[in-house]
Image (spheres, rainbow, N blue to C red):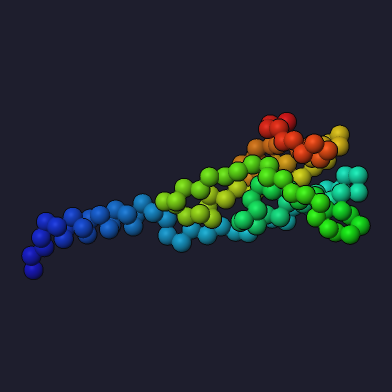
Amino acid sequence: MKISFFSAGLLGAVFLIATILPAEAKRVAPKLVEPVVIDYVRYTAPNEPDQIGEVVASDVGSGREIWRKRIYRIFVNPFMEEDIQWVFITSLVQRNHMLIVTNERGKRFTLDPKTRRVTKGK
């Protein structure tokens, strides 16, 4: 059986793509982040794929959402598996009436609950 130059090239390209692209890359679910309460407001990190990098402020008494703030954004490469690119929040900590947010890459952000201003690296 003869293989044409085109067939051999196509077969080589398919093999190359199959070895470069990850197969079914699935990540484990992010760990639950403990909520933080400051001045009767509960701050949580939903850690859902459509809410990556968000903090939600809710009234402690009613549980009703007051506001939400995007702390950071991730940019997804369309040529890679989406779920392996997600970067979730791993911890929320109160310090001097500020909220310290840390993500899976170890990056830290400070959220001022009064102004909702976010600063990096503090």
Q: Is residue 15 above or below residue 119?
A: below
Q: Is residue 20 above or below residue 114?
A: below
The residue located at (85%, 59%) in the rendering is 63
The residue located at (73%, 41%) in the rendering is 101
For residue 111, which quarter of the picture? top right
Residue extending farthest bottom: 1
In the figure, is residue 18 to the left or right of 47?
Answer: left
Q: Position of residue 62 (x, y in %)?
A: 89, 59
Q: Position of residue 72 (x, y in %)?
A: 64, 41
Residue extending farthest left: 2
The residue located at (8%, 68%) in the rendering is 1
Q: Nearer the viewer, residue 42 or 106?
A: 42
In the figure, is residue 6 to the left or right of 14?
Answer: left
Residue 37 can be seen in this image: yes
Residue 90 can be seen in this image: no
Q: Position of residue 43 (x, y in %)?
A: 80, 49
Quadrant in which the C terminus is drawn: top right
Q: Nearer the viewer, residue 114 or 122?
A: 114
